[in-house]
Image (cartoon, rainbow, N blue to C red):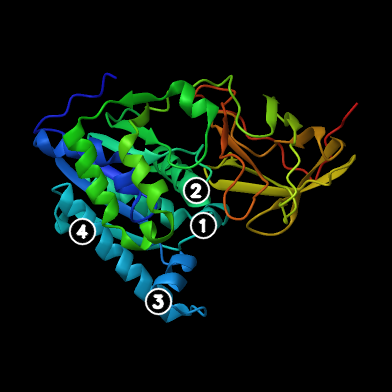
Amino acid sequence: MYLPILDPRTRVMMFAPHPDDESLAAGVFLQRAVAAGADVRIVYGTDGEKNCWPQRLLERKMRIGAHDRRRWGARRQAEAIAALRVLHIRPEQVEFLSLPDQGVTDLLLGGCRETIRQLADAIITWEPTHLLIPSPADTHPDHSGLALLLRFAFDNFLPRHHQIQRLEYLIHGASASFAKAARGLPQTSFESKAKRRAIACHVTQVALSRRRFLAYAARPERFVLNYEKSILTNDGPIRSFARSRDALHLRVAFALKPLRAQETSLYLIGQDTLGGLRCLRAALPGRAARLDLIDCASGAIAGVGRYQGDAFRAEIFLPAHGFALNRSLHLKLDRRVWFFDEAGWLEIAPLLPRGTAAAPPRRSATRELAVA
């Protein structure tokens, strides 16, 4: 793999959704950065305070309250500091944003402009040359949610022609699109052992999953550079998609999931014609029916589409008016089994070049997409 050149002028900033992700995703890369004399900064999205089953095991208590979660979050912060010391990164190089654990996607769906601004400020203030960020294809909702928040931070607050090199990493799931575009980073035996020691510092996490966590030290780290990916490969149940000025057409095929307790939800998020964040959701009926798209911020019906098919195969027709034609759309089908998503977010490319100004659509009442 041809990595960007690291030298004393390099400034590496990593956004990690939780304490432990720094070691799992980039323990070797961070060692290389330190060895090259680069400046390094680690920013944690959450404190990982809602990881309740290891807490119940280690503390031998079933009922976990708010105070217990805060204490657990502080313990995980301390473990992160210890792991980073193994990688020769000092506490003053670390920042904790303390976003809600298991709540990052909820922040995203709620509009969260303040959080996006906070992420942008962290990047603008520190001025990194290289940025390590989670992939939106990750099946952990905190990882994929933080990935989208960072993309919106770039789109809204950073200069269009910035020189930051972005490297996406994936920890959870087996995304075919990520695997096709990612490049592996070979590691030495010394680097692998140091990474293993760093992972072992996260005592709360290896308590229940020691073998799984330590196995990350034996795998090559993999990164997608600057959103390099194949748009022909879709993850999860979405088999194909087509975007036009006013509509979105999806073909989906669902696998049987007997343990799935929740309904299947569709989320569509992007920027509106005024630059604001617009998020819509719909519950998929599993049979031919109209599809109400609900605005996540107001709870009002923002549009009406159509679901044609059954619980296993379907075509979905969605109105897409109100979204900026020169910005990407992001789509996710939420079919969670326990905690993890079946797939992360799918990016749908803009219809117009980024710098093109598109005339805003005429305002109208809620419309149903005509389906032949």
- Give the secondary structure at mark 4: helix
- Give the secondary structure at mark 3: helix
Q: Is residue 249 left or right of residue 225?
A: right
Q: Residues within 10 Å of mark 2 (few under 14, many from 20)?
A: many
From the viewer's side, name the closer residue of 29 and 202.
Answer: 202
What number of labels is visible? 4
Residue at x 84%, y 38% (from the top left corner)? 306
Q: Is residue 300 left or right of residue 174?
A: right
Query: Where is 68 relative to 154, above or below?
Result: below
Q: Which residue is mark 2?
A: 145
Q: Residues within 10 Å of mark 4 (few under 14, many from 20)?
A: many
Q: Position of residue 134 (x, y in %)?
A: 41, 41
Q: Nearer the viewer, mark 3 or mark 1?
A: 3
Q: Which mark is residue 59?
A: 3
Q: Which residue is mark 4?
A: 82
Badge 2 vs badge 1, beta-carbon distance below 8 Å: yes
Cα–Cα span, label 4 and label 3: 20 Å
- Give the secondary structure at mark 1: helix
Q: Which residue is mark 1?
A: 107
